[in-house]
Image: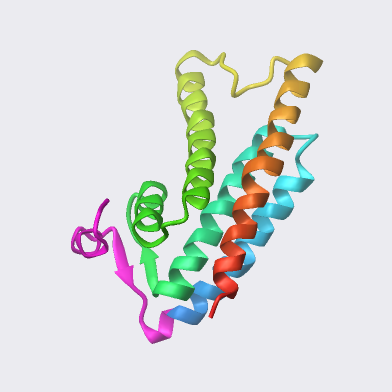
Amino acid sequence: MVKIEILISEGKVARLNELEIDRYVNFFSNSYKDNLAHCSATLVSFPRWSIISGYYAMHDITKLLLAKKFRLKIELEVHATTIKVLQELIKNKDILELIDKGYKEFISLANDLAEAKKERVKAQYYTGTAFSKETYANRASEFLKTVVTPYLEKINALLEEK
């Protein structure tokens, strides 16, 4: 595991000062909810974006937890650094497995996009078939149900602890 102090010295993480804390907590309190609402709203019509928004809901609530409970903010390599900090601070394996699944799904879509940029024909883009749309819709629904929602519930429970 990476120590928080090393990440701070590398400029990847910083401590929140008194003037920043309320702004960070307020922003991420709203941002994760917006992403969750977008995830739910686009499940059928735009399931790829539903998966992306679901992951961002997970990412943002994690940054809310880091700000509110540990007074930390992520500065560089935000996705990987957020997960490293979470692994260092949280010892709940269920939470860590869920964020890892969410990140891998997000990276999978990002990799698809990178390949599509080169080839212009990858799974990131629909072929227009009903089968393709249905496949992604099922994938997005399953992702929301088995990864996003349980993760948000577990992080919210940590946020409510005194």
Quadrant of the rendered image containing residue 131: top right
Name the image colouring.
Answer: rainbow
Magenta stretch contains residue 94: no
Magenta highlight on residue 13? yes
Residue farthest bottom in this picture? 18
Residue 26 place in picture, x, y as percent: 57, 75
Q: Residue at x 54, y 58 (%)?
A: 60
Please say if 42 is above or below 150: above
| Image location (x, y in percent) of residue 145 | 71, 42
26, above or below 133, in the image: below
The answer to whether residue 129 of the structure is visible from this angle is no
Viewer can see residue 63? yes
In the image, taking residue 97 as reference, residue 42 lies left or right, namely: right
Q: Nearer the viewer, residue 87 or 80?
A: 87
Q: Position of residue 62 (x, y in %)?
A: 50, 59
Residue 127 x %, y %: 70, 14
Query: In this picture, which residue range is highlighted in magenta?
Result: 1-20
Q: Is residue 93 above or below residue 28?
A: above
Residue at (74%, 36%) from the top-left corner? 141
**Quarter holding residue 98:** top right
Residue at the spot x=39%, y=75% of the render? 71
